[in-house]
Image: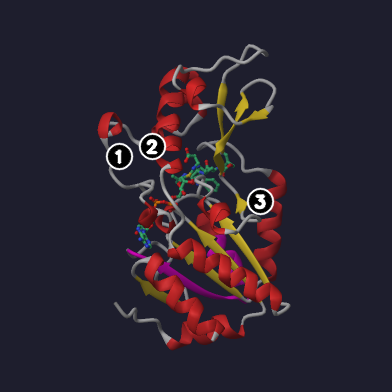
Amino acid sequence: MSVDIPEEAVVSLRQARCVVALTGAGVSAESGVPTFRDKMTGMWEKYDPTQLATPDAFRADPALVTQWNAWRRRLILETEPNAGHLAIATLSERMRADGREFTLITQNIDRLHHRAGSTDALEIHGNLMEWRCSVTGEITEPTDEQLDDPPIETEAGGFLRPNVVWFGESLPEETIGRAIAALEACDLFLSIGTSALVYPAAGFSQLANAAGARTIEINRDPTPITDAVDISVQGSAAEILPALVERALA
Ligand code: BV8
């Protein structure tokens, strides 16, 4: 199916010297990873992710939060990167080969960008493959067997928790510092597959705009930034990204 890509978006990407792309759960949707605001399924149907992804929820019931994250981790490990992830990896490789800059910032914790080849993605919300001791912060990758018996106590007397950023927790300092530096230097900002509701990521398009960058949103549905960006392309990231990248790099 041919995708309708505004020529203005193609020209902006072709001419950009320093691109920053921000991705959200919508980029992984077509790999089969439920987005943050999709209804959850099975035993998790009655839960609200924003209520489970908090330090208070973990303190109150470490077994439940461990079980929820083990379920998401197992679901993610059964998925593959989609054409959208691969298009972003291709864009990054080609822009750097041309001496241009490309920074990928992701809110996603599924590591599908890594598996598609974007191994330097800035994971501002962490990732679900790594877990850490709630007392020492020591990072480990638990086995399926360990995760089948939640909660997982650590030698330091704490529990293993996902190495992700929960609501109310600060983002990893070094990672967010690199993201902000890239945003302040870019001449094109792409917001892809995110509802633009979670801060500070939801404020990145304004930061890029203030730095003089053109802004493009690629998203299935309208969001709070749709009217503010220079170009809005509504539709599937897995269809739009390959078409946009192919034409911009032609
Ligand atoms: C913090 C990891 C300092 C965990 C997540 C102002 C400034 C700073 C903070 C705040 C602020 N106002 C409020 C806050 C607090 C809070 C916040 O933003 N709350 C919101 C709800 C109002 N922010 C924080 O707590 C952050 N911490 O700032 O520290 C601080 C501390 C305390 C107090 C103040 C400041 C931490 C936020 C990180 C939370 N962790 N995830 C986990 O996953 O378990 S957030 C979670 O939401 C995921 O990371 C997810 O990626 C992210 C954002 O959601 P989206 O990715 O956008 O996903 P969503 O489902 O919403 O949307 C998907 C979109 O895709 C949709 O629009 C859909 O149309 C589109 N789509 C679907 N399919 C497709 C598609 N598009 C294209 N193609 C498709 N096929």
Q: Position of residue 127 (x, y in %)?
A: 56, 42
- Quadrant where the N terminus sits is bottom left
Residue that label 3 marks:
176
Whole-percent x, y for residue 192 in the image? 46, 64
First of labels 3, 1 by sequence position: 1
The residue under label 2 is 49
Q: Nearer the viewer, residue 245 or 108?
A: 245
Of the residues tagged 3 and 1, which is closer to the observer? 1
Mark 3 Cα-neighbour bin, 10 Å: few <14, some 14–19, many ≥20: some
Residue 46, by quadrant, is: top left
Magenta stretch, residue numbers: 204-220
| C-beta proximity under 8 Å, tags 3 and 1 | no
| Residue 89 shows up from this direction | yes
Mark in the foreground, 1 or 2 = 1
Amino acid type at image mark 1: Met
- Give the camera-side residue of 230 and 140: 140
Q: Crowding at label 1, few (<14), some or many (≥20) Cα neighbours within 10 Å?
A: some
Q: Is mark 2 within 8 Å of ligand 1?
A: yes
Disc 1 + disc 2, Cβ < 8 Å: yes
Query: Is tag 3's residue or tag 2's residue first in the polypeptide sequence?
Result: 2
Cβ(mark 3) to ligand 1 < 8 Å? no
Query: Element under label 2?
Result: helix
Identify the residue position indicated by label 1 in the image: 40
Q: Is residue 245 magenta?
A: no
